[in-house]
Amino acid sequence: MKYRIYIDEVGNHDLGSSDVPGNRYLSLTGVIVELEHVRNVLHPEMEILKSSFFGSHPDEPLILHRKELVNARYPFSALRDAAVKQAFDEQLIEKMEQWEYKVITVCLDKKNHLETYKTWRYDPYHYCLAMMIERYLFFLEQNNTIGDVMVESRGGKEDRRLKQSFTTLWEQGTDFVEADRFQACLTSKQLKVKPKANNISGLQLADMLAHPSRNEILRKEGRLEKPLAPFATKVVRILKGKYYRSDTQIYGKKFI
């Protein structure tokens, strides 16, 4: 068996924007899925869902994106009909619960990070990614298996920075995990970076889970100003059973 963790982010890595309330937190959410489950279940069932409600065609596949779905923007205009929206939400929630995957979310308070490290400032994205991959490693070791890592492309300079950050982890390890442990479980030192247009189901699932997962962590820490939306509340109930955990500890949620 081989696994892949699909990673999506909420927020940005810019420390200069830490004082802006909407930019204070950076979170990464990783969705761990066994690749045969992606091939045989997750991808085909997601395509059926998109085709049933939005007429998605293999030649021009629709890409599920949380923000566009929430706002019923084209090509998801059908969700402006209350009955259609209710039916879609119910089926999506059902599938989110049925699909087999584990979730890891790491959320960083950039403002506190900036104030704590006046002279030495660890790049926020690298900091979160290191904690994410450590926990992914624990999952792979616990299941005696191997895996790789995929993120959505964000453009030339950003992609190069992400790839270098991942390669550094693979080659040097972290303060807590030696490099040889990463190299034993991760099948490549190259981060897989794919564009949104590639219609990768794992990245779409990560996109839909990332925001509710971050808000669940902030709510638990007393940092969320608004209550969870009704749909997000349903997603959070599912996430409680999907966060990665060992017998003694939950590794799927980390607030820094």
Image: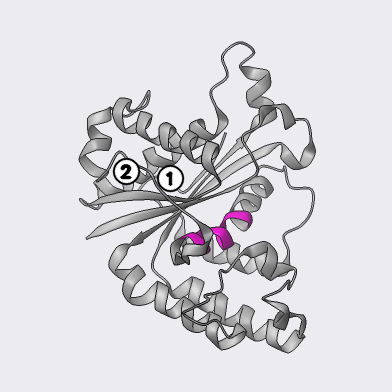
Picture quarter containing residue 69?
Answer: bottom right
What segment is highlighted magenta in the picture? 203-211
Three-letter residue code for mark 2: Phe
Picture quarter containing residue 85?
Answer: bottom right
Vertical position of residue 58 compared to residue 168: above or below: below
- Residue 210 in the magenta stretch? The answer is yes
Percent x, y of residue 181: 24, 34
Q: Earlier in the sequence, mark 2 or mark 1?
A: 2
The residue that disc 2 covers is 138
Question: What is the number of the mark on residue 195?
Answer: none
Residue located 44% across and 41% down the image: 132
* Label 2 with label 1: CB-CB less than 8 Å: yes
Percent x, y of residue 174: 37, 26
Vertical position of residue 81 compared to residue 100: above or below: below
Q: Is residue 246 visible?
A: no
Vertical position of residue 138 compared to residue 173: above or below: below
Residue located 52% across and 75% down the image: 61
Question: What is the number of the mark on residue 251?
Answer: 1
Disc 2 from disc 1: Cα separation: 9 Å
Relative to 119, 239 lies left or right: left
Picture quarter containing residue 100?
Answer: bottom left
Task: Give the residue at the far top of this rendering.
Answer: 119
Three-letter residue code for mark 1: Tyr
Secondary element at tag 1? loop
Percent x, y of residue 158: 54, 38
Instruction: Identify the image quadrant of the N terminus.
Output: bottom left
Percent x, y of residue 115: 68, 19
- Residue 33 in the magenta stretch? The answer is no
Relative to 173, 116 lies left or right: right
